[in-house]
Each structure stands twice: as C-alpha cells, then as structure tokens.
C-alpha cells in the first residue's frame, strides 16, 4: 500500500451534532462519582469538567505540563509520573520503554536523543490529535511508527488551523493508516505537504 493516496474512507458512524447551523460542543451534563479526580477547563462560561461522556471524565494529571511546557504525563497503573522521555502518558511509571509517545525518538525500544537536528521518529502506536496543543508535539516529526488519526474539534479558528502546516509539514512517512475525521478546520490536506508514503502495516478497522 505504499504510494499515492487513491482512496478516501469516510466513517459514517461518526456523529456530529448540529443546531442552528453551528456544530455543537459536548454535553455540559457530567455526573461522575469523584469530581476531585477530573480535569477542569476554564472558559467564558466559567469552570467545567472535562468529560468523555456523562459518567466518565478526563482524569487530571499534574505532570501533563511542567513549568509551562509539555510534561511526561501520568501512568495508567497508579497516576505516578512517567519517565522524562515520555509524552502523553505511559503504562508504567519511570520506565522509558512504557511511553505512549516519545519526547525524542525510538531506538531499540528505548527513547533517546537524535544527533540529527529536527529528525524525530515518533514511536506512538496510536497517535490521535484532537487539539492544536497536542498536535504541536509532532512539530519536528518526520516518521510516524504506527497510525495517525487527526480530529480537530469545535473552537479551532482558521488562523490556528493554518498553523498546522508547520506542525504536520515535516511528516514524510506513516507506517500504519492515516485518518482525518470530518472537521471544519480541514478543507484539504495541504498541511501534509511532505507526506509521500503510507505503508498500511495496520489498517483502519482492518479494512
């Protein structure tokens, strides 16, 4: 499956709420057992819990950001701090082989620095970008070892969307599949100007 993109698969199961000509945000109704574990966001309407659905919230992690920069995240097992080479969390704390994403690149499983400037091999097995801040983690990536799913949610301005060219513009290879979900921020794929190879080692829904 290496070569140019000839087929685009649209996932009809994705539901987008629309009202009065505007795309609606997630429900404000979030009823969880322990709100103290949930992440909160502050916006014009005040403070709000970050929820995946009515009964499940995004758990707060004090290590997502450290001193204003992206941090290693928290371990799934106990919420402890992940290894310094991790990005976006890990399965086991303080283990550079258990990262969901790499701060630098993957060599013989372990995450280490690359001597070549701006050469970052991203070793995510699952790269799902849903906001500009998380997308910025890929700014210097050239290879995605796994699949890439992109979904820019409601609230991203046209200016912010145009800046994604700098974020995705260096990606040349995706080893798995590539999915862009329907979004008003995407009208074409010009921001992936360097993408030349999708190997298809893993397929979307095994198709």
Image (cartoon, grey):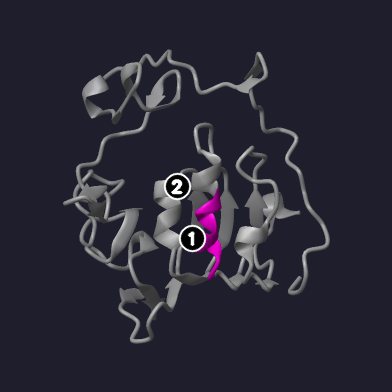
- Residue 14 lies, with reference to residue 71, above or below; the image says above
- Residue 114 lies, with reference to residue 161, above or below; the image says below
Q: Identify the disc placed on residue 100.
A: none
Q: Report the span colored magenta.
A: 162-170
Indicate left or right for 1 with 51 as reference: right
Q: Give the residue at mark 2.
A: 132
**Viewer-nearest residue: 91 or 172:** 172
Q: Position of residue 120 (x, y in %)?
A: 42, 74
- Residue drawn 26% across and 47% down? 64
Q: Dots 2 and 1: beta carbons under 8 Å?
A: yes
SS type, badge 2: helix
Indicate yes or no whether the magenta region holds residue 42.
no
Mark before the other along the chain sequence, 2 or 1 = 2
- Residue drawn 55% across and 66% down? 169
Q: Give the residue at mark 1.
A: 167
Query: Which residue is situated farthest in the bottom direction here?
Result: 115
**Viewer-nearest residue: 160 or 136:** 160
């Amino acid at each position: 499956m290496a070569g140019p993109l000839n087929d685009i698969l649209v996932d009809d199961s994705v539901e987008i709420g629309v009202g009065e000509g505007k795309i609606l945000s997630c429900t404000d109704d979030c009823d969880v057992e322990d709100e103290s574990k949930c992440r909160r966001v502050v916006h014009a309407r005040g403070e709000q819990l970050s929820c995946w659905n009515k009964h499940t919230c995004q758990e707060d992690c004090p290590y997502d950001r450290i001193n204003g920069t992206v941090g290693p995240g928290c371990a799934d097992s106990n919420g402890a701090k992940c290894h310094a080479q991790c990005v976006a969390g890990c399965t086991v704390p303080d283990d550079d082989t258990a990262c969901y994403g790499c701060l630098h690149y993957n060599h013989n499983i372990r995450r280490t620095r690359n001597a070549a400037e701006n050469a970052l091999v991203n070793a995510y097995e699952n790269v799902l970008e849903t906001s500009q801040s998380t997308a910025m983690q890929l700014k210097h990536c050239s290879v995605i070892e796994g699949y890439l799913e992109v979904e820019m949610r409601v609230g991203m301005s046209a200016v912010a969307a145009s800046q994604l060219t700098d974020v995705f513009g260096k990606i040349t290879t995706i080893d798995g599949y590539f999915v862009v979900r329907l979004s008003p921020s995407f009208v074409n794929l010009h921001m992936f100007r360097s993408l030349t190879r999708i190997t298809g080692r893993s397929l979307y829904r095994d198709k």
